Image (cartoon, helix red, strand yellow):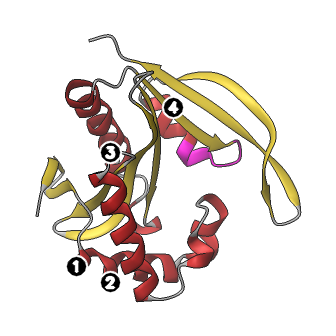
Amino acid sequence: MFIFTEFKTGKDIVKLTLPEVEHAKDLYEIVDKYRSYISRWLPGVDETNSLEDELNFIKFAREETASYKALFLTILLNDRAIGMVDLHNISEKNHRAEIGYWISKDFQGYGIMTESVKRLVEISFNELNIHKFIIMAETENLKSCAVAKRLDFDHEATLKEYLVYGDEFKDVYVYSKIVNG
């Protein structure tokens, strides 16, 4: 298993690792248990209806990472998969990338995601030469917005009626952070 970084939160050890086949069961159980909650904020959850679907996503994530199109990482808490964090829409030419993340409802509010995103930004700046990081969060996703604010991302824009959820158009906040070293 390749460990991207690790840190402690209280007595617990959190690791950010490349997605592995053995993570699929834990990740799928979270998606299945909290499907209606997670699907509200994370596109693609509706297509994850079996362990095989989760395994296919892990294969996709590893292929995208191997080809430098994205960087997907599993968040492990004491070696149990509890969520994911990623870089996507990476532009090598423009030295920028978007950040996406989700974590089990059971582990929200403990600072795990904030620290995971912080570590991803630090390492991506140092190792991948990313200069600008972007987080896009639906305006009603207060927890996701809070992660961006805690990490001193700037509110750069509001995209009006950018997403559709059910029959409703939803606004999206665009947060950014420029890292100069």
Q: Which SS class for mark 4?
A: strand
Question: Which is nearer the N-term, disc 3 or disc 4?
Answer: 3
Question: Which is nearer the N-term, disc 2 or disc 4?
Answer: 2
Q: Residue furthest right?
A: 167
Mark 3 surroundings: few (<14), some (14-19) or many (≥20) residues within 10 A = some
Q: What residue type is labelled 4?
A: Ile
Of badges 3 and 2, nearer the viewer stands: 3
User: Is residue 143 in the magenta section?
Assistant: yes
* Left or right: 155 in relation to 116: right
Residue, disc 3:
68
Alpha carbon separation for disc pair 2 and 1: 7 Å
In the rendered structure, are the residues bearing label 2 and label 1 in contact, judged by CB atoms less than 8 Å apart?
yes
Which residue is rendered at x = 40% and y = 77% of the image? 56
Residue, disc 2:
25
Residue, disc 4:
134
Mark 1 surroundings: few (<14), some (14-19) or many (≥20) residues within 10 A = few
Q: What residue type is labelled 1?
A: Glu
Magenta stretch in the rendered image: 139-144
Alpha carbon separation for disc pair 1 and 4: 30 Å
Q: Which SS class for mark 1?
A: helix
Q: Quadrant of residue 40?
A: bottom right
Residue, disc 1:
22
